[in-house]
Amino acid sequence: MDLQLNGTAVIVTGASRGLGAAITRSLVAEGARVVAAARSVDALEQLAAEHPDQVHPIPCDMRDRDAVAALVPATLAHFGRLDGVVNNAGIAPAGRLVDTDLAVMEETLAVNLLAPAALCQSAARHLIAAKRPGSIVNVASTSGLKGKADRKSVVLGKGGGGGGGGG
């Protein structure tokens, strides 16, 4: 398949394993260069070793606003451009909502809602200023369509569809 991605630069969050790693590999196969962001440093480095010229690993905890804010500038510094973002990182703590500490809910909202929104804003601002077309893809769990009784995502939105804990 030719998605015409040769030379493009894309940020993928939750890139260290699962769907995020598969998305990264697929983008690379189409000619894109990828900033692979996740918490799992060893897995990111292994992914980058598979594609040393096309994957740039950046350890990033999606709960850390400063780390998320640094992704667009880091992409521009490394690849000289930004053409897209795949917000894939996500968490879905198991357990009953009534038994869940508010701190867990805040963490879930930070990873699944606030971090992707902040990254969307940052990327969109850059794309608009650069007058460059781009794409932003937000990955969500099917829990948004049909909830699961043991997942807080029933109430909080995006569930575990994105890399199992942010990578």
Image (spheres, rainbow, N blue to C red):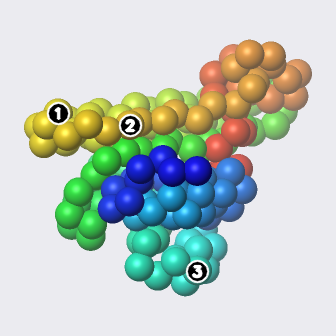
The location of residue 106, given as percent across then percent down, is 55, 33
Q: Residue at x 37, y 45 (%)?
A: 84
The numbered mark, 1 or 2, whose residue comes first in the sequence reads 1
Circle 3 sits on which residue?
Answer: 50
Q: What's the residue type where badge 3 is placed? A: Glu
* Label 1 close to label 2 by CB (< 8 Å): no
Residue 120 is left or right of residue 116, and the answer is: left
Q: What's the residue type where badge 2 is placed? A: Ser
Circle 2 sits on which residue?
Answer: 135
User: Which residue of the protein is positioned furthest toward the right in this rendering?
Assistant: 149
Observer-nearest residue: 117 or 139? Answer: 139
Q: Residues within 10 Å of mark 1 (few under 14, many from 20)?
A: few
State the mark number for residue 128. 1
Marks 3 and 1 sit apart, C-alpha to C-alpha, by 33 Å
Residue 46, compared with residue 8, is above or below; it is: below
Marks 2 and 3 sit apart, C-alpha to C-alpha, by 25 Å
Q: Which quadrant holds residue 32?
A: bottom left
The location of residue 158, given as percent across then percent down, is 63, 28
* Label 2 close to label 3 by CB (< 8 Å): no
